[in-house]
Image (tube, rainbow, N blue to C red):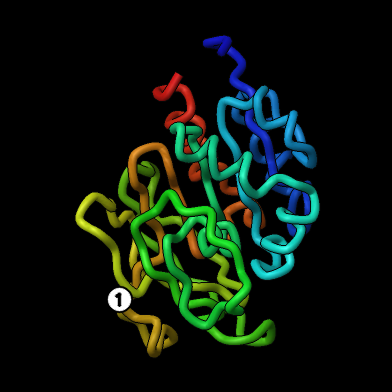
């Protein structure tokens, strides 16, 4: 890996790929879409975007990316998952289809669509450990939350107690385990690049 320009891929099967590529390009990395198994070998890190986790799971198998990506993650490839990406990186997902594939990498149990359907999007300002500069404005769209996290998982953010939070109050929505980062929300949609910069720091430290 070049110290100056790590190569970070965005899984480009479905979801908000373009927004992640733009956010990463502003972090002084080479950002590229990933659709083929051979492209995984060139990466120093990968982003799994928001979208529809069942669809992405099925396409991973269709494009013969499932096992190669699992192998690279098991070998320590840094990864960041937002929303659907968090679901895929979790060891277990509640309310997922029985045939959904889990990539693993995070010792967490997530609840799929915990915040409700598309019309039930939710926004909140979060205190985010490891991110400087004040609260992170988080946009949740049909988002998961973390039901439970293992002992090696660092909890980075929870939904605060607020009048609008309802049942989501106190729920875990950002985690890190080693070189793997995940958020239940979509920082790529807000123009706030701090979460992506945190991930790029993880990529650089892994190199």
Please name the residue shown 59% across and 63% down the image. 101
Please name the residue shown 75% across and 46% down the image. 64
Local SS, label 1:
loop
Quadrant, the C terminus: top left
Please name the residue shown 43% across and 68% down the image. 92
* Front residue of this view, candidates 135 and 83: 83
Indicate the position of residue 28 as horizontal and vertical percent values. 62, 23
Indicate the position of residue 66 as horizontal and vertical percent values. 65, 49
* Front residue of this view, candidates 87 and 169: 87
On screen, 100 above or below 120? Answer: above
Neighbor class of circle 1 (other Cα within 10 Å; few <14, some 14-19, many 20+) is some
Residue under numbered circle 1: 170
Q: How many marks?
A: 1
Q: Residue 52 is drawn in which quadrant?
A: bottom right
Indicate the position of residue 179 as horizontal and vertical percent values. 40, 37
Q: Left or right: where does residue 113 sit relative to residue 177?
A: right
On screen, 46 above or below 89? Answer: above
Q: Left or right: where does residue 175 sit relative to residue 24?
A: left
Indicate the position of residue 71 as horizontal and vertical percent values. 54, 38
Please name the residue shown 67% across and 22% down the image. 42
Q: Left or right: where does residue 37 sit relative to residue 169?
A: right
């Amino acid at each position: 890996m070049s110290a100056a320009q790590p190569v970070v891929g965005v899984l480009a099967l479905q979801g908000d790929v373009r927004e992640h590529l733009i956010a990463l390009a502003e972090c002084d990395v080479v950002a590229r879409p990933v659709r083929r198994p051979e492209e995984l070998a060139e990466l120093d890190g990968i982003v799994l975007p928001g979208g529809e986790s069942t669809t992405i799971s099925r396409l991973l198998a269709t494009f013969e990316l499932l096992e190669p990506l699992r192998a690279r993650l098991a070998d320590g490839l840094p990864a960041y998952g937002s929303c659907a990406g968090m679901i895929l990186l979790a060891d277990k997902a509640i309310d997922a289809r029985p045939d959904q594939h889990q990539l693993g990498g995070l010792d967490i149990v997530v609840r799929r669509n915990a915040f409700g359907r598309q019309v039930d999007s939710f926004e909140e300002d979060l205190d985010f450990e490891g991110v400087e500069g004040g609260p992170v404005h988080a946009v949740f769209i049909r988002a998961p939350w973390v039901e439970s996290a293992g002992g090696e998982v660092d909890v980075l953010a929870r939904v605060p107690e607020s009048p609008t939070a309802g049942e989501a109050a106190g729920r875990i929505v950002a985690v890190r385990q080693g070189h793997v980062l995940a958020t239940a929300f979509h920082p790529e949609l807000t123009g706030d690049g701090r979460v992506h910069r945190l991930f790029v720091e993880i990529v650089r430290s892994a190199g």
